[in-house]
Image: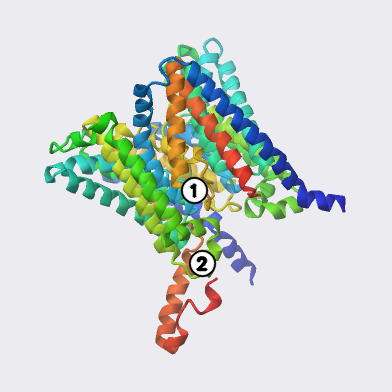
Amino acid sequence: MSAARRRAARWLRPEVLTPVVSFTVVLAAFLLTPAYHGHELSDFDVYNTLQGFASLGLIALALGLTIIAGEFDVSVLGMQALGGVLAVKAGASSGLLGVVVATAACAFLGAVQGGVIARLRVQSMPVTIGSYIALLGLTNVVAGNETLTFTNTDASIWINQTVADFFSPRSLIALGAFALVMLVCGVTRIGPELRALGGDRRAARAAGVAVDRRLVALFAVSGALPGLAGAMLAYSNASAQLNPGLGPLVLAAAAAVLGGLSLRGGRGLLWGLLLGALAVSLLEQVFAITALPTSSAQIVFGSLLLVVVVVDAPDLRSSLARLGARRTSMRQVPPERSNPRRNGAEI
Amino acid sequence: MRVAIEQRFGPLAEWRSLRGLLTGAAALALVVLVVFGLTTERFLTVENIKAILSSASIVGIMALGLTFITLIGSLVSLAIAPTAVMGAMVFLVELHFGLVPALAISIAAGALVTAAQGLIVGAWGANPVILTIGAGFLVSGVTAKASGGVIVQPTGGGWSTLNSTPLGVPLGVYVMVALALVYQYVLKRTVLGRRVTLIGENRQAARAAGMRIALITAIAFALAGASFALGGAFLGAFNKGASAQLEGTLTFDVIAAVLVGGTLVSGGRGSALRTLAGAIVIATISDLLLLRGLDTGAQILFKGVLVVLVVIATFVTSGRDAA
């Protein structure tokens, strides 16, 4: 194989191709919005996209890391809610203190959860569904069952101020967190180890990966990131929501699949995930500019998830191949040999 | 050598001690529950028991359906609440045809929408969690568009029948119990039920045995969707109207009932009667906490912790290893 072809093959891997294509398509749609909607794009649209990314990106990163490692953390939704309430409670006089308390508490709860999952080797999805419900309850208890207003106006203004036209401290912190995780995974062995956890857990264990410790750290991070996102969102809105609903999970899952992550685990690149999260943020901004009704946006994101989940489905290719083979065999092979049940290749 | 033995038998020994611990914990929890129940005023009254069953019924009906999805190894559906709201809307809109036709149309719609998801999961092994999130969003969007975002009102008078209380017990309770018995029979005594369980237990073996996995998965999902829509019809009748507001935390309430019943989330082990028990246990505990003066937040917190504990207990006693 020539060097050029090898390079082409590298680019054609799904974890590379999917995020590049989806980001390019959405970016084109974003840039073309003025053409079909008569709305001149401004710095503010980019700023708003990045504000959306500040929540979505962190939650997508948390969910994406667990997906790469072959897990699925539903509790990111609960961590986001709890983070918001804790930050509003603890940040009344010092904004920084609120964010630190929220992030640390969510990291701690995530680590406990990761410890249980690692020690008992139980599936993470059902456990995190339970802890998601428990976290919503805890959020209500902490908030006294009512939506909290954030009175520290200085912190709200500071976190939303415009920096270099496009950014705010909030979006810069989110991008910084993303960069930090990418750096740690890129420089250390943690990145490949996470993929190994998702690809073949037993093989990873046999190869000497400290599986339990990695899982505890993984769930600590997947608790801390949405906790941070919830804290900053609450500051930004000057109030803390008690129940974010399923919406953030849908957007994060869309970011993960558009980012080229395989839902079976073991495949995915963090810069791909970043592009996926940016693509979803841009798409949301396009919907906001064109004043698309919520129901239409739901239909678009729902259909998008359905399409990518079908493309990602493990048996799709073999099933199509079987269908093709059956057609061919019907044409060429005597009928008694075309019975697919009798030909062992199916198993 | 010793390392090898520990590697082979270490986790097993751990499970055995954990199992003993869990049995003890479950017994202790039961004693605490009984003591709390006996010492809480108005808990052991006929009126309160009726209230518990009544609050369990709508979630229970839907959870019985979800049991099929969980048993066949497709984990859970995250489209439960949107499907139920769709069922409620279709029921109320079609009421001008009369109660029974409206119910039938609503149930058929729920079954059809959910069976399509089952077909994709069964035929191609698509990730059921993400697929149902997407499908739920799609259903929400379409129903919001169709209803124009306003509260759907009943077009006929039949809805009040669903709120009736024969012999002082809400109709929904009878439906929940009847459905539990029928589903239990289907799961344990029919070929379909055994196939559902086998696919959940070992998909590869089921495929090797020549089972039509796509078809059976679609049927299991159809039964689930029918139950979501039926529960939705009761919900719509109870509220005398339907909108996305009804969704609330319904999806996770239903999932909690199945998990607390002790159905193994990875499939292959569980039953309709377990789910019935799960729905009633959750309703009982919520009622007890309410009578003791705890607020909504504490009730939700308690429910979540219960789900986590039962999931772990179910998993440990099943002796399976995820890693």
**Which x, y percent locates residue A294?**
30, 37
**Which x, y percent locates residue A145?**
43, 18
Specify the subunit that label 2 lies on. Answer: B
Question: The C terminus of chain A is located in which quarter?
Answer: bottom right
Is residue B222 rendered to the left or right of residue A326? left
Q: Residue at x 63, y 54 (%)?
A: A199
Classify mark 2: residues with Cα within 10 Å, few (<14), some (14-19) or many (20+).
some
Residue B55 in which image quadrant: top left
Q: Is there any visible trace of residue A172 in the rendered image?
A: no
Q: Which element carries disc 2, helix, strand or loop?
A: helix
Q: Residue at x 46, y 23 (%)?
A: B299
Q: Residue at x 21, y 31 (%)?
A: B240
Q: Which element carries disc 1, helix, strand or loop?
A: loop
Vertical order, A170 against A157 (above or below): below
Q: Please, which residue is most extreme toward the bottom here? A: A334
Q: Is there any visible trace of residue B240 in the rendered image?
A: yes
The numbered disc on residue B75 is: 1
Q: Residue at x 49, y 54 (%)?
A: A18
Is residue A307 rendered to the left or right of residue A226? left
Query: Camera-side residue: A5 or A128?
Result: A128
Residue on which disc 2 sits: B207
**Which x, y percent locates residue B183?**
39, 50
The earlier-in-sequence mark between 2 and 1 is 1
Q: Looking at the image, how many numbered discs can be counted on the residues? A: 2
* Mark 2–mark 1 distance (CA, rounded to whole Å): 19 Å
Query: Camera-side residue: A217 or A151?
Result: A217
Question: The N terminus of chain A is located in which quarter?
Answer: bottom right
Query: Camera-side residue: B275 or A183?
Result: B275
